[in-house]
């Protein structure tokens, strides 16, 4: 049975209830470079942080490999941003809806295969592996494809000039589902690992990866996830790997603008003993 949501606005803060039960925090209105949307304050969210130790049995070292980025992105499974050009990002890895076939789209497709998907998004369905809106007057409508997520973004966040009801409602559904369901949280972890596996596969085509220390690989993956390398990302990575201290050179990519993030990334990589001795194997396409 689909949940019935009520949205509550109090000043800049938005809350919701599902079936008129206990209300929960969704987000706070903010403005960024002329754009308006939501973000959520960690202090107002349930303490629902990604911790690699909780997922190591299932995902082995990959749970640790994604954790430094998780720290940089806030760690909370309920993290939300709708105020920038990505239009809608969600989760501890800040999956972004503006990228066709990207992490958010793949994660959302996976969620829609769950038995309880109709409780949260009854108006959406999967058809030929694509997200469709099934309740429009004109019939079933594809919301994303290989070229665009424009229609999906319009569903999640109609404009970047105000906080709309549809935007708060979509955010409330993701937050409610993720808070209630271990499977929904596991979906975030699985997607983050799948994304980072993809980064390693891409790196093998660009640079010498065999026996590359996991510390180097983690920084490279974070650069690709965050996008701070710009248009010359691989040129910068290649130059860093040729440096006498490749790890520090990789960390420096994107500085000084991203110095706070890269310092945090370094700190959490160096603090995790699981990285010690791990390196990439081209033959196994995994860490050994």
Image: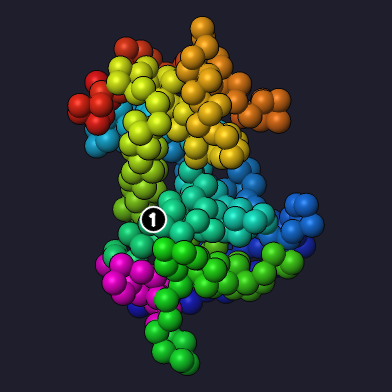
Compared across the picture, whether 137 is left or right of 257 comes to: left
Compared across the picture, whether 41 is left or right of 137 comes to: right
Task: Answer whether residue 49 is magenta in the image.
Answer: no
Q: Percent position (x, y) of residue 93? A: 48, 43
Q: Percent position (x, y) of residue 196? A: 38, 38
Task: Answer whether residue 128 is magenta in the image.
Answer: yes
- Residue drawn at x 44%, y 53% is 102
Q: On the rendered image, what quadrant is the N terminus found in?
A: bottom left
- Residue drawn at x 63%, y 43% is 43
Q: Circle 1 is placed at which residue position?
A: 107
Q: Percent position (x, y) of residue 277? A: 32, 12
Q: Is residue 137 above or below residue 35?
A: below
* Quarter where residue 198 is shown: top left
Q: Nearer the viewer, residue 114 or 160?
A: 160
- Furthest-right residue in this view: 34
Q: Percent position (x, y) of residue 260? A: 66, 27
- Residue drawn at x 74%, y 66% is 161
- Magenta residues? 115-134
Secondary element at image label 1: helix
């Amino acid at each position: 049975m689909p949940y019935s949501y009520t949205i509550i606005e109090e000043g800049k803060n938005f809350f919701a209830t599902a079936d008129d039960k206990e209300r929960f925090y969704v987000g706070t209105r903010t403005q960024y470079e002329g754009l308006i949307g939501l973000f959520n304050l960690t202090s107002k969210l349930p303490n629902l942080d990604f911790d690699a130790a909780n997922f190591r049995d299932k995902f082995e070292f990959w749970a640790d490999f994604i954790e430094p980025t998780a720290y940089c992105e806030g760690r909370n499974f309920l993290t939300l941003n709708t105020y920038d050009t990505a239009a809608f990002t969600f989760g501890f890895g800040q999956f972004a809806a503006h990228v066709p076939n990207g992490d958010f789209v793949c994660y959302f497709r996976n969620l829609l295969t769950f038995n309880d998907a109709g409780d949260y998004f009854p108006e959406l369905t999967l058809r030929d592996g694509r997200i469709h809106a099934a309740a429009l007057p004109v019939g079933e409508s594809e919301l994303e494809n290989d070229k665009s997520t424009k229609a999906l973004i319009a569903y999640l966040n109609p404009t970047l000039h105000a906080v709309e009801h549809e935007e708060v409602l979509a955010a409330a559904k993701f937050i409610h589902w993720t808070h209630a369901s271990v499977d929904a949280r596991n979906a975030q972890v699985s997607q983050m690992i799948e994304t980072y596996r993809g980064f390693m596969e891409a790196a093998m085509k660009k640079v010498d990866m065999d026996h590359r220390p996991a510390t180097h690989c983690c920084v490279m993956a974070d650069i690709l996830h965050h996008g701070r390398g710009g248009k010359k990302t691989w040129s910068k990575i290649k130059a860093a790997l040729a440096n006498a201290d490749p790890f520090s050179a990789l960390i420096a990519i994107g500085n000084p603008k991203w110095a706070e993030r890269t310092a945090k990334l370094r700190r959490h990589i160096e603090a995790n003993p699981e990285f010690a001795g791990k390196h990439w194997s081209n033959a196994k396409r995994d860490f050994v």
